[in-house]
Image: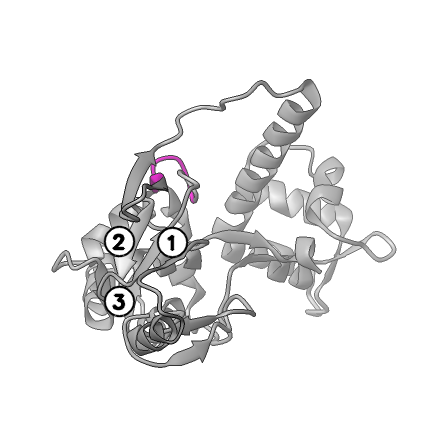
Amino acid sequence: MAQNGCIPNEVRGGGCYWGPDVTEEVLGRHNLQLLIRSHECKQDGYEFCHNRRVLTIFSASNYYEVGSNRGAYIRMGPDLVPHFIQYQASRTCRELTLRQSVGWTERSALRALREQLFVHKSDLISAFQEFDPNNKGMISLRHWASATERVLNLGLPWRLLRPQHVSSTQCGMVDYQQWIRELSITEPKQEISDNSILETMYKNHSNLETIFRIIDTDHSGLITFEEFRQTWKLLSSHLQTEISDKAIADLAQSIDFNKDGVIDINEFMEAFRLVDISAHT
């Protein structure tokens, strides 16, 4: 992180954020010149920070989606000066077996379908509630399937797809409130007060990098909370959607994972990556 100090990374549940003071102390203690680290996406595949004493290298291009970032690796000669090789993968470099190909295609399709379900979350809840007049949170599998098809209008056999999307049923009943929770954006601990912002952002998830550049009005590579607020006010007017200042502030603070008061591209892209909670429980 840019500021001094060391704080736990509560978003990931492990590791920490550390500042330039910690870098200088560790390198000085061990008589080192440079710290090379990885496992943090960088748009160009690598990035220096902390007065060029820390180098992040990230070798997976297209990490979020095709075109989102380049990959890179380092070559070092006897002079120990790092030389960077950048690349952008454009196609699969090896032949897949039929099973691998089908499995990859199926996972991709199911992910795309989960994205559509999340985008229409509010409409789905309203449709399910029509079959739940006592607000018990449970509806029949038949009603779940018909309501889902009515909202998405995709012509899919939802009853057959149920095992791929609903983790469990009780006597033919679907706990739709739990199911909606399992279709979730990676969420920080702080609760967002207006889910319409999240849904609007995810509807445009393929353009997230462009959205980041638009919000970053001074082209600093960082979004301030004020830039975030001003852009959302403009977007809400254009989209004819009423969004409160509190909802915008809540979302901005939740995206700022390391709590340094600004949002970088990595935090922005990570915040809107769809995850299936049921796959991790």
Q: Amino acid at mark 3?
A: His
Place of residue 203 in the rendered image (x, y in percent of width and height, measured from the top left) = 40, 47
Task: Return the residue nearer the eye: 132 or 168.
Answer: 168
**Magenta span: chief secondary structure:** loop
Q: Quadrant of residue 270?
A: bottom left
- Disc 3 or 2, which lies upstream in sequence? 3
Q: How far apart in space, not on screen, are marks 3 and 2 (Cα)?
A: 24 Å
* Residue that label 3 marks: 50
* Residue that label 1 marks: 269
Task: Return the residue nearer the eye: 56 or 243.
Answer: 56
Task: Return the residue nearer the eye: 170 or 8.
Answer: 8
Is residue 71 one of those drawn in magenta? yes
Quadrant in which the C terminus appears: bottom right
Mark 1: few/some/many CA within 10 Å (<14, 14-19, 20+)? some
- Disc 3 or 1, which lies upstream in sequence? 3
Residue at image point 36% right, 55% down: 56
Camera-nearest label, 3 or 1: 3
Q: Secondary structure at mark 3?
A: loop
Stretch of the chain drawn in magenta: 64-72
Image side of residue 175 versus residue 250, left or right: right
* Residue that label 2 marks: 212
- Image height check: is 205 above or below 252? above
Quadrant in which the N terminus appears: bottom left
Question: How many marks are shown on the rendered structure?
Answer: 3
- Disc 1 or 2, which lies upstream in sequence? 2
Q: Secondary structure at mark 2?
A: helix
Q: How far apart in space, not on screen, are marks 1 and 2 (Cα)?
A: 9 Å
- Image height check: is 122 above or below 68? below
